[in-house]
Image (spheres, rainbow, N blue to C red):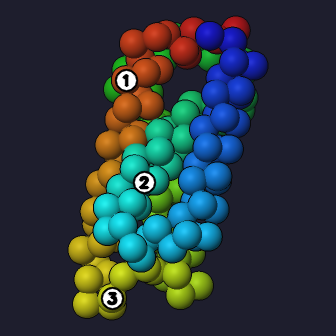
């Protein structure tokens, strides 16, 4: 896969995620459909993982070739955790937690777990399809 195709995939995922979030906010889906944030976090984790791969390839152009699966996993999961915890901090400090304070820690843990599952999906896609054999 070329860097351009990877860039396009990251862009499409971001667009789908943004549209889903905007619709969720407009129609109060986070409040009325208890499970709605689960697919959003899965998609967010997938996007964050793919973005981490893209960012790695752009910033390390001189060494990109074959990346060992363990290193790729660390790259993807690190990216997912950075984005996931940043999003959770944004929600908390902006007051958009969408849950009662008594459930906040549990909700945050569940959100991060689904972010990681989305990231693992990104890792598997990249690993199985050889996306890091980019030159």
Which residue shows up at 35% across the image and 56% down it?
Answer: 38
Give the total of numbered labels: 3
Which residue shows up at 64% across the image and 53% down it?
Answer: 18
**76 left or right of 104 in image:** right
Q: Earlier in the sequence, mark 1 or mark 2?
A: 2
Q: Earlier in the sequence, mark 2 or mark 3?
A: 2
How far is the residue under mark 1 from the one under mark 3? 35 Å
| Nearer to us: label 1 or label 2 | 2
Any mark on residue 124, and which?
1
Residue 128 position, x and y percent, is 39, 12
> Considering depth in this image, is 63 or 131 the residue closer to the camera?
131
Any mark on residue 26, and which?
none
Check disc 3 and report the residue beneath it: 100
Residue 112 position, x and y percent, is 35, 59
**56 left or right of 124 in image:** right
Check disc 2 and report the residue beneath it: 41
How far is the residue under mark 1 from the one under mark 2? 17 Å
Q: Is residue 63 visible?
A: no
**20 left or right of 112 in image:** right
């Amino acid at each position: 896969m070329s860097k351009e195709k990877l860039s396009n995939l990251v862009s499409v995922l971001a667009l789908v995620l943004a549209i889903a979030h905007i619709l969720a906010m407009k129609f109060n889906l986070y409040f009325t459909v208890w499970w709605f944030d689960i697919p959003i976090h899965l998609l967010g984790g997938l996007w964050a993982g793919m973005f981490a791969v893209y960012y790695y390839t752009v910033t390390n152009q001189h060494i990109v070739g074959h990346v060992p699966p363990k290193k790729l996993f660390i790259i993807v999961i690190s990216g997912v955790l950075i984005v996931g915890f940043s999003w959770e901090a944004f929600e908390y400090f902006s007051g958009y937690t969408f849950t009662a304070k008594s459930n906040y820690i549990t909700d945050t843990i569940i959100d991060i777990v689904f972010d990681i599952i989305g990231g693992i999906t990104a890792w598997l896609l990249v690993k199985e399809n050889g996306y890091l054999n980019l030159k």
